[in-house]
Every structure is written in structure tokens, then in C-alpha cells.
Image: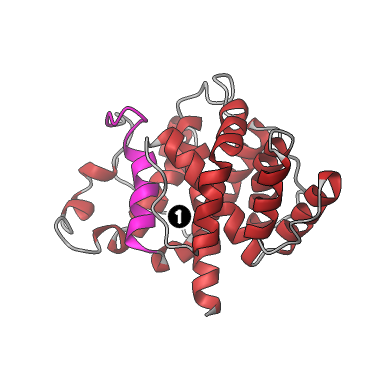
Amino acid sequence: MGIKYRRDDDLAFLQYCTEEDLQVLARYLTHDKDSEPRITSELLESQDFKAHSGHAEQYRRCWHLIAGELQHFGGDTFVNVFRGGGVLYKEVLSDVCGKLKVKYGKTDSAYEIENKLLDKFISDSWEKMSAEQKEELLRNVGLDGKLGGAAGLLALQAALRLGGAASYKVSIIVASAVAKMFAGRALAVVAGGGVMRGLAILGGPIGLAITTILTVPAISGAAYRVTIPSVIQIAYMRRAYEEQDRF
């Protein structure tokens, strides 16, 4: 049928993302966690994608094909035939949040919904962390490490809602844990040493929370094994792009 990308304001920023981050996103779309090719994926067989084979920025040049593939996974295959393409990103994101029981407002932007999704993972991890791990997390995202208990979590949630650096750093931690679970490796990101130290310390609690949230029932549908990690990757990429653009 061929990949058809529907113009989507929430995905247009992908064209400015790094080759490495786009490769991770494409990996979720084209292979399962055992590195087996997905039979429903069309990206690797796309003539447009193959035409850029060997180019240092093959994935950046084909960002619209990657976005179109995600839209395809987010929509019903039969319906896509008549629609002429998949669904817009916000619908994919909303579907993932519904599956994971993440509450959001109908008028929320994609960015705000992504923050609530990130909040889900951090909040569920909070009780599993030791006092030292909570302190390290708060410091890594630029908050007062002395805040403990409910006060620390409330401060973290407030920082997430505001966006910016705190949201970016949280997205690194969550996306890295998800990449390790779904792709068998940690996400390769360029980040400050403090964040990377935090990844090592928080890998246990965050990883445990993600494993708990992403139980078999939650990812029982084949599409969810694609859309859930892809949405989390996009949340990270959007914040990485904004941080880069800010400076």
C-alpha cells in the first residue's frame, strides 16, 4: 500500500531531531524486542527509504516515512485503507494513555498529555525509591533534594507540568528505561553527567515501575507493543528538540 504521512503539527518537529533518536523510534516500528522484523512494518521495504541507504542521515531524510509508519500503527489497518493513511499523533497518544489509565483533559495539548504520561511512570516509581534515590532524582531535575515524601513528589509533578528542563530530564530517564525493555539497550542520549548518574541510580525503581505498568494485559495488542514505546520516545525527542532550540 505504501507509507502515507498525514500532515501533523505534533510530528513536524521530527525533521529536526537527531539521526540517532530517529533510529531508536524507527527500531520500535520495524522490529520487536527480540530483534525480529515486524511483518506489518513497511518502512524498511519502502523504495523511498531504500533510496537513501548508506547516507549518514538516512533516517532524518525519511522522517516523514517514520512518522507515517507510526500513524499507520495507531489506526485500524482496514480503516486506514479507506482513510488513505493512519491517524494523527494526538489520537495515538490519547489511545496509549487510555490503555495505561493516564488521565488527561480533552483540551490538553500533546505536550501536556505527554507530561501526564511521564508523570505516571515517575509517580508509580516514587514509593519504590529509597530516600537517597528520591533525593538524587530531585537534584537531577533541578529541584531541592531535601524535599521528601509527598512534598518531593508534588514538587516533581509541578515541575513536569511547567515543562522545560525538568520535563526533559525526566523524559530521558523514562525513555531510557523503556528502550532497555523494548529494544534491549539503553537509549543513547547526550546528556549532562548528573542525569546519566541518575539513570544508573534510578534504573532499578524506574525499571521496576515500567515493568509493572507495562504488564502483558497492557501490551496484549500487537499495536501497543509499537505505540507505547514510540510515544514515550517521541515525548523525549520533543523535549530534546526544545532544549536544543532553547540554546
Q: Within the image, what quadrant is residue 30 found in?
A: top left
Q: Please state the horizontal and vertical placement of residue 224, each as a whole percent of the image.
A: 51, 31
Q: Please state the horizontal and vertical placement of residue 42, each as a whole percent of the image.
A: 29, 40
Residue 22 falls inside the magenta stretch: yes
Q: Residue furthest right?
A: 151
Q: Which residue is mark 1?
A: 6
Q: Quadrant of the N terminus?
A: top left
Q: Within the image, what quadrant is residue 144 found in?
A: bottom right
Name the chief secondary structure element in magenta: helix
Q: Residues within 10 Å of mark 1 (few under 14, many from 20)?
A: some
Q: Secondary structure at mark 1?
A: loop
Q: Is residue 188 left or right of residue 236?
A: left
User: What span is colored magenta in the figure?
Assistant: 18-37
Q: Residue at x 64, y 47 (%)?
A: 118
Q: Nearer the viewer, residue 160 or 49?
A: 160
Residue 82 visible? The answer is no
